[in-house]
Each structure stands twice: as structure tokens, then as C-alpha cells.
Image (cartoon, rainbow, N blue to C red):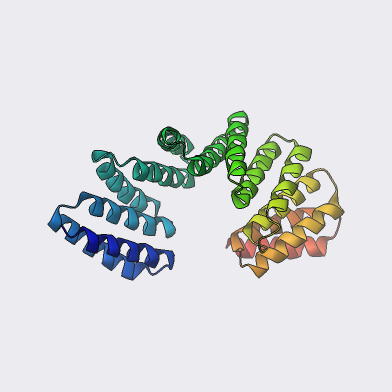
């Protein structure tokens, strides 16, 4: 069997995908399928479909990504490759969450949980619990959301994974925010920012500053809200986070309307509409 050559090609293709060199990656995937089929190497074929699914996922082509992931997982299930099955269940869950099919996403996440629990894989359980928590949040089931997000935080904390701790505490904050508990929400957003201290300002900072501003805006604390929202806007410009900037502009337009600064309100409303279009 040509397994060693195929394995090298798989690694090379994964690196090409990481660098967004999708045309070359697709050429390699065709070659992996061809060589795997010729040598009867099922795992090579399975991984080829997994890699192609990753490309479509990166390109936000959910339909094609799902088709390839499902082809991949059917092969891995046939040979009982449980680590790959768990990873794919998570990826499939993420795709269903992207199209707001949260119940289907949860069904896939829980399949992954069963596998990761059996081998006590704390790192991946932390990731899955976070995904479960955010899906429950989107369904408005804040009690279940809070439970799984706190379980994710415990696991991430035991591994001293500060980046995932930042992500999970932010998500716990948004759960409290959805329940109208702004004080609790803000304490978690601030905790998330403390975990992000050693990292360069980026999306995590934007999310937390934006939601802090939104909470303070709701409470009528306009000066503090403005400070957080303007900071979030600045980081979104510096890091070219256009989709996040649209929401920030909306909050700033609302803030300046409420403080009778109509010139600035129109400025940010215009920016929001420009980004949206």
C-alpha cells in the first residue's frame, strides 16, 4: 500500500489549507483520493473528504462542507476511528450552528462528548462544552447554556488555557446578558479581558468592549459606554474586523441619539448602513 506517500500528501495538503492555498490543496485531494482508491486505503479517502470539507467550511459553503464531512465520517465510522469521528461530529455541529440549526448541532456535539468522555480528553471536552453552551444560548435555554459554559471554563482552567478561558468567560457573560443580568454579565466580560491581557488586541477584545458598552448603554451610563464602544471601534478598524464594526456603529448611533448628539448619531448610522450594504 502507498500509505506513507499518501500520509505525506495529507500533511502537505493540510498545510496548504492553513495558508488558504485552496487550488493547490484541491489538486492534492484529487490525488489522495485516486491513490487511496488504487491501494484500497480507506483512511486516506476519508481524510481527503475531511480536508475538502475544511476548504468548503473556510469558504462558508455549508452545503458542500457538510456533504464532504458526512462522506468522511461514514468511512471513519465503518472502521471505528473514534478520534476522527469525534472531531467530525464537532465540525458538523459547527456547520449546523452556522445555519442556525442548533438542535441538529447539539445532537452532533453530544456524539462527540460521548467519545471524548470515554478517553477523558479534557482539552476537546472543553471545546465541545463551549459549543454546546453557545447553541443552548441561541435557543434561549440560558440555564443549560450557563451549565455547559461553566463546565467548559472548569476544564479550560484545569489546563491553564487562558485563551479558551477568555472565550468561555465572555460567553458566560453573554448568557447573563441575555437574561438581563447586566452586572453579572459585565463581571464576566471584564474577567475575559483579564485573560486576554497578554495577547495583542483583536477580536476577543472587540467582543468584550462592545458588550460592556452595550450593557452600560442599557443602564443609561452613557460616558462609560462611549469609552468602551469607541475603543472597540478603534480596534475593529486596526484589525480590519468589518462585521463587528457594523454592530458597534449601531450601538454608537443609539448612544449619540440618546445624548442628543445627532451629528455623531448620523455619522455612525451612516457607517453602519455602508458596512451592511
Classify the position of the N terminus by image quarter: bottom left
Q: Residue furthest left?
A: 38
Query: For residue 118, what is the image quadrant?
Result: top left
Q: Residue 204's x, y, as percent?
A: 64, 55
Residue 16, compared with residue 91, is above or below; it is below
Q: Residue at x 52, y 42 (%)?
A: 131
Q: Nearer the viewer, residue 239 or 4?
A: 4
* For residue 213, side relative to residue 102 (left or right): right
* For residue 201, side relative to residue 164 (left or right): right
Q: Residue at x 37, y 43 (%)?
A: 83
* For residue 97, side relative to residue 161 (left or right): left
Q: Nearer the viewer, residue 4 or 226?
A: 4
How many numbered marks have been drawn onto this rendered protein structure?
Answer: 0
Q: Residue 227's x, y, as percent?
A: 81, 58
Q: Residue 264's x, y, as percent?
A: 79, 64
Classify the position of the C terminus by image quarter: bottom right
Q: Residue 211's x, y, as percent?
A: 71, 49
Residue 42, compared with residue 59, is above or below; it is above
Residue 143, compared with residue 54, is above or below; it is above
Q: Residue at x 69, y 57 (%)?
A: 248
Amino acid at each position: 500500500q502507498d500509505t506513507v506517500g499518501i500520509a505525506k500528501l495529507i500533511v502537505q495538503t493540510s498545510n496548504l489549507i492553513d495558508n488558504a492555498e485552496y487550488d493547490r490543496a484541491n489538486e492534492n485531494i484529487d490525488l489522495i483520493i485516486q491513490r487511496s482508491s488504487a491501494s484500497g486505503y480507506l483512511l486516506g479517502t476519508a481524510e481527503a473528504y475531511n480536508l475538502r470539507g475544511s476548504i468548503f467550511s473556510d469558504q462558508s459553503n455549508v452545503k458542500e462542507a457538510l456533504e464532504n464531512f458526512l462522506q468522511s465520517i461514514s468511512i471513519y465510522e465503518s472502521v471505528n476511528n473514534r478520534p476522527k469521528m469525534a472531531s467530525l461530529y464537532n465540525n458538523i455541529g459547527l456547520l449546523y450552528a452556522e445555519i442556525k440549526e442548533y438542535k441538529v448541532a447539539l445532537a452532533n456535539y453530544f456524539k462527540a462528548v460521548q467519545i471524548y468522555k470515554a478517553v477523558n480528553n479534557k482539552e476537546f471536552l472543553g471545546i465541545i462544552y463551549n459549543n454546546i453552551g453557545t447553541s443552548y444560548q441561541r435557543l434561549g435555554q440560558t440555564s443549560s447554556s450557563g451549565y455547559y459554559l461553566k463546565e467548559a471554563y472548569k476544564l479550560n482552567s484545569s489546563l491553564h488555557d487562558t485563551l479558551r478561558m477568555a472565550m468561555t468567560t465572555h460567553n458566560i457573560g453573554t448568557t447573563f446578558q441575555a437574561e438581563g443580568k447586566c452586572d453579572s454579565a459585565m463581571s464576566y466580560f471584564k474577567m475575559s479581558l483579564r485573560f486576554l491581557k497578554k495577547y495583542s488586541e483583536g477580536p476577543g477584545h472587540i467582543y468584550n468592549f462592545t458588550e460592556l458598552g452595550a450593557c452600560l448603554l442599557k443602564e443609561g451610563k452613557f460616558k462609560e459606554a462611549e469609552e468602551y464602544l469607541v475603543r472597540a471601534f478603534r480596534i475593529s478598524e486596526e484589525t480590519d474586523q468589518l462585521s463587528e464594526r457594523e454592530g458597534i456603529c449601531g450601538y454608537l448611533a443609539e448612544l449619540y441619539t440618546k445624548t442628543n448628539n445627532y451629528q455623531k448619531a448620523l455619522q455612525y448610522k451612516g457607517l453602519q448602513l455602508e458596512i451592511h450594504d
